[in-house]
Image (cartoon, rainbow, N blue to C red):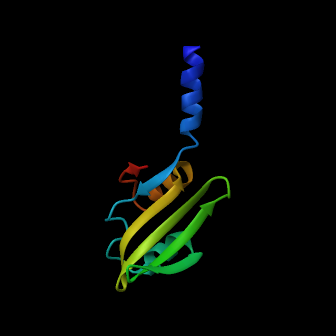
Amino acid sequence: MRNLVILAALALAGCSVGTLNFGTTNYKGQPLSAAIERLGWPEEQGTIAGQKTYTWIRGTALQECRIRVTMAGEVIDTYEGFGDIGICSQYGAAAGGLKGYGG
């Protein structure tokens, strides 16, 4: 029974959803074109607290990662992912490595 509980916990860990913080150094200070070069054109654009944001959506409807870049003028201020950790981690690694998980 104990082994079954451990196996179930491991299986569910692969389906976790949370927020990823890719760190402030991955694209910070670089132009938006640096992220576009790696991720393609963003699916969404917006403004949060007066700062432009760009969002990419990766994965499927069941396993989705939203990657958001927040600008500081003409350069990237933050780069973060929200959603399926398995999908998001692929883009964290592509951008220089994950800096940490949040939930």
Q: Nearer the viewer, residue 44 or 27?
A: 44
Residue at the location (56% across, 53% down)? Answer: 87
Residue 41 visible in rendering: no
- 99 horizontally vs 38: left or right: left
- Which image quadrant: the N terminus? top right
User: Which residue does the image show at 44% across and 72% down from the upper left?
Assistant: 69
Determine which quarter of the picture holds residue 71.
bottom left
The answer to whether residue 31 shows anywhere in this view is: yes
Work out whether 101 lies above or below 39.
above
Residue positioned most to the right: 61
Q: Position of residue 11 (x, y in %)?
A: 59, 33
Observer-nearest of 58 and 82: 82
Looking at this view, name the residue that lies furthest to the bottom.
74
In which quadrant of the rendered view does residue 25 lie? Answer: bottom left
Task: Tell which residue pokes out farthest to the top in this image.
Answer: 1
Question: Which residue lies most toward the front here?
Answer: 49
Q: Residue at x 37, y 69 (%)?
A: 78
Instruction: Name above or below for residue 82 compared with residue 51.
Output: above
**Which sits in the foreground, 3 or 38?**
3
Residue displayed at 54% across by 23% down:
6
Q: Is residue 17 above or below residue 24?
A: above
> How many numbered marks does the figure carry?
0
Residue 72 position, x and y percent, is 34, 80
Q: Position of residue 50 (x, y in %)?
A: 38, 83
Question: Foreground: 53 or 50?
Answer: 50
